[in-house]
Amino acid sequence: MGSTTAARKEAIRHNQNELLYKGVRFSVIGSLAAGVVAKVFFGPLATSQVAVWTWFSILWLVYLTRAADYWLFTRATRAHENVQHWTRRFRIGAMASAAAWSLSMWMIFPVDDPAHQVLLILTLGGVAAGALASLPYDRTLSNVFQLLIFLSVFGRLMVEGTGFAMEMALFSVFVFGFLLSCGKDVGKNYIDLLRLRQDSQETNLTLIRTTEQMARLGYWQWDLNASTVELSNNLTRMLGFNRKQVNIKECFDLMHPDDRLKVQHVCAQVLKTGADAEVEFRTEDRQSGDIRNMRQVTKLLVGSDDSISMLGTVQDVTDIKSAEQKIYSMAYYDDLSGLANRAHFHELLDAEFGLARLRQQEFAIIYIDLDDFKGVNDSYGHECGDNYLVHFSSYLTSLTQRGDMAARLGGDEFCLLLRNIESPQQANDKALQCLEYCKQAVQLGNHRIHPRLSVGIALFPGDAQTADDLVKCADMAMYTVKLAGKHSYAFYDERMARDNHERVRLEADLRQALDRGEFELWYQPKFAIADNTLAGVEALIRWRHPDRGMIPPDLFISTAERVGMIKEIGEWVLINASAQLRQWNDQGMQLGMAINISGDHFVADGFSDFVFATLDRDGVNFSDMEIEITESLSRDPEVHTRICRQLRRKGVRVAIDDFGTGYSSLSVLGKLEVDTLKVDKSFIDGVVDDPAAQLMVKSIIDLSLGLGYDVVAEGVETAEQLVFLRDNGCPFIQGYLFSRPVQADQIPNLMTMDWSLPRAA
């Protein structure tokens, strides 16, 4: 606070000095002119001409010295830093002036000439009054100046001692008293005005500096006749200088070499036309070496004396540019992979259509999907999945040539735009390059992934005439590859469009099938080999389409998973299977019921609670219900264990369907949180004549039974298969040898039939 107050006083004092020195030139001229008049009028009446010339010389010496002091002050570059020095010099000069005029009463006083005496006193009164005009910003100095002259007048008249002199002395008291009183009020008003001006100036400067700092603004002014540029405080800091006066070459040296000519050209245009101009350039931070982006508005200034200077307002827009770039990247590029996003890809594809038509060129797009990406996420976590996407994005970028573009459309779907191709073979070769990604495992942290891709290709102009249609064509080609077994590529053809239309129609019909009651449950019997009885059933969903008849599950289950209906369908199966089990129990039949649940439904929130609530409502024993899940679910041990444990704690059984075809091995049998293993039909088909299949099935049965699991052999169709399974201790079997899936009303009849093995054999 103290330093701020001291600085403010220094600033006010400097302003006082400037205003006081500004009055010196008029004071010098007026005083010398008055001195000449005084010598001419009063000199001949003086008692000594030597005294007259001595006084006149002193007066001229004083005022010429003051004129020289004024000249030095106006050219002092550090006057604002030496305030007290210049204040003392000015006061000494003013006191010398007062002393010189005071001497006139003693050196040129016209003795015995009252009329001229009055004139001399009035002249000195005028000089004293002139102090009000020349010294208004220093009240003390003005009063002292007047007081010295008054004391000289009063003292000389008192020495004279005549009656008229005493009267003039009394008159001078009133005159100079009035001047001193006016000087006091005038000085106070001027000082208050100066302080108010300083306060306003400081407020404005504070506002300007604050605004400059907040907006990262600065300004410079360049007198075109000089080689230096004056910088504002904030611009000095922004550019890393330690001084405000900087050589013009130093400023240009800070600019990026590619931008210097541009800035010089703009300055030349402003000088030539007089019109304001805006330009952006880059500078190098003198401390950190970082590149900063600057935006400058340049204008020409013409002074009242026709002097020409240039003013530049400079703003550091580095952060603004960075934000603009970030917004642009967020709008047009994928954060994870750095590739173009869907919006940007379609925007460029639209432009490519216009350009290709104009130049009569062909181009292609390659649609790529990472097969089983969801499995990677489920097994190894989303971080590993993200790293997988980044790794593939990098590989895809390496395949792009100049003019081509890679994009991530979302999830695990990517696109390549191949511009200006000469033949479809180029697209064919690029697709093969994409598939080469799958030739070796990808190491991501502690995990090794074996990539598989499905690739679709569409060509312009042969396949489509709009961007959206071309993407759809490539997508259909890729989807066709997926349906055909994945890990390949295909060019689009019209047959794919018809197939896609059929899929879309199937999806639309599937969405209405639940509401229309078109689903049915059929039941595949499960037989116990030990006592030749019907031990339970597996509920299988069927879709009876009103126009197309029975649609097999293989055709619509995958569609239901794709369109997000699998949870609704799974809940419908569970509700109806539980109700049917209740009905059979009421008829005196004790059967187990197995239900297939998709992976998405199994890991959905609240699945276990839904199962418990459904069984409770129907009053079904929890142990009579068995939930079958595919083996691939066991790849996420944490999720699998948690849900299985919830079900089994309440008594609901859990089975692994199609065991042996997924990702597990015999070594993990002891870790599974399940009750039953169902051996896949592909192994059962080979147990008659394939030693490897025989060994595999026998091992599964032995280990499973030894660990306390039930075992069900699926797809038993021949007596030879039955004999092998019986001889190796398999407790349960399913297959067409005994029965195909039947409707619920046929199950009571199957319960009463004789299923002895000899008859079956």
Image: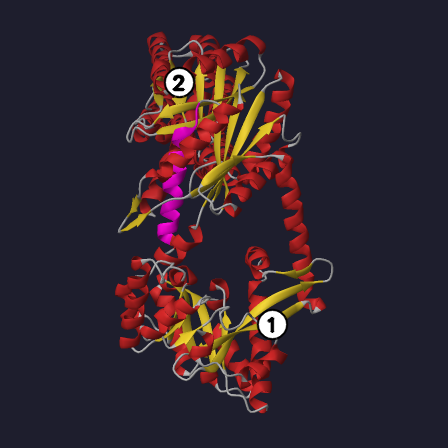
Look at the numbered disc 1 and give the secondary structure of its residue. strand
Asked if residue 703 is positioned above or below residue 368 in the image, the reply reads below
The single residue placed furthest to the right in the displayed view is 547
Question: Residue under circle 1?
Answer: 521
In percent of the image, x 37 and y 56: which residue is there? 381
Instruction: Using a 10 Å C-alpha cutoff, classify the residue at mark 2 as few (fewer than 14 neighbours), some (14 to 19) or many (20 or more).
Output: many
In percent of the image, x 49 and y 11: which residue is there? 265
Secondary structure mainly formed by the magenta segment: helix
Q: In the image, which residues are magenta? A: 383-401
Gap in Å between the C-alphas at discs 2 and 1? 90 Å
Looking at the image, which is closer to me, 717 or 256? 717
Disc number for residue 229: 2
Look at the image and say whether residue 392 sits in the magenta stretch: yes
- The answer, for residue 155, to whether it is visible in the render is no
Instruction: Using a 10 Å C-alpha cutoff, classify the residue at mark 1 as few (fewer than 14 neighbours), some (14 to 19) or many (20 or more).
Output: some
Looking at the image, which is closer to me, 533 or 521? 533
Residue 476, located in which quarter of the rendered image? top right
Residue 351 percent coordinates (x, y): 61, 27
Type of amino acid under label 1: Leu
In percent of the image, x 34 and y 46: which residue is there? 450
Look at the image and say whether residue 317 sits in the magenta stretch: no
Looking at the image, which is closer to me, 709 or 573? 709
Residue 479 percent coordinates (x, y): 54, 44
Type of amino acid under label 2: Val
Which colouring convention does the figure follow? secondary structure
In percent of the image, x 60 and y 37: which residue is there? 473
Residue 6 percent coordinates (x, y): 33, 41
Q: Earlier in the sequence, mark 2 or mark 1?
A: 2
